[in-house]
Amino acid sequence: MTRTTTGFAHQRLDAFHAAMELTIGVEGLAAGLPRGHADLKDQVRRAASATMRNITEGANRWAPRDKAARFVIARGECGECDAALEMVERLRLAPGRQVRRLRQLTGRVAAMLTGLIQRQHRADATG
């Protein structure tokens, strides 16, 4: 995985880099989905991308409460991405190994987001 640094706070978060990996993986998966599943294809792509974008936005906010709110949204989008991937898996629209790897990434990103949310809540309570 190539990491570029721009000086923005999100670049320092493993959650951002994992979400970027998820987004790129979902794009590859979506490109191979069969015709007739445009809604599912669009949904999984938007949820993965929204996860990454909300992590970015949260990381670059100043106030702990603002950060936590964006991370909560990102976690919800990540769950939505996982549900769409589960549909892909159950409908057997993509190779099972590829879908399982992406679903593992959603679990990893969600776990990291839980930690980030908890950290911001603690910072807000002490601030």
Image (tube, rainbow, N blue to C red):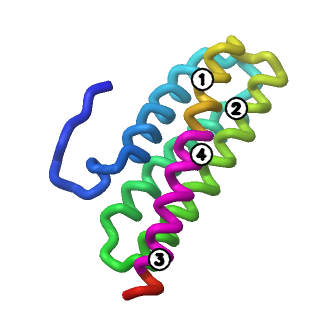
Q: Amino acid at mark 3?
A: Arg
The mark lying in front, picked from 3 and 4, is 3
Query: Which quarter of the rendered picture does the N terminus lie within?
Result: top left
Q: Which residue is mark 2?
A: 85
- Vertical relation: 68 (above or below) 95: below
Q: Given contact means CB atoms under 8 Å apart, are the residues at marks 3 and 4 in contact? A: no
Marks 1 and 2 close (CB-CB < 8 Å): no
**Mark-to-mark CA distance, 1 and 2:** 10 Å
Q: Position of residue 80 (x, y in %)?
A: 68, 47
Magenta stretch prevailing secondary structure: helix
> Who comes first in sequence, dot 2 or dot 4?
4
Task: Say which label, 1 or 3, has the lower sequence index.
Answer: 1
Q: Earlier in the sequence, mark 1 or mark 2?
A: 2
Residue receiving disc 4: 47
Question: For numbered disc 4, what is the local secondary structure?
Answer: helix
Tag 4: amino acid: Ala
> Dot 1 surroundings within 10 Å: few (below 14), some, or many (20 or more)?
few
Residue 17 sits in which quadrant? top left
Q: Earlier in the sequence, mark 3 or mark 4?
A: 4
Identify the residue at the far right of this view: 90
- Left or right for 105, reference 61: right
Amino acid beneath label 2: Leu
Q: State the CA–CA distance, disc 3 to disc 2.
A: 32 Å
- Report the magenta residues as a range: 107-123
Read off the residue under disc 1. Answer: 101
What residue is drawn where x is 66% and y is 19%? 33
As drawn, the label of residue 93 is none
Distance between mark 4 and mark 1 Cα atoms = 16 Å
**SS under mark 1:** helix
Residue at the image position 50 percent from the left and 50 percent from the top: 112
User: In this figure, which residue is indicated by the disc labeled 3?
Assistant: 122
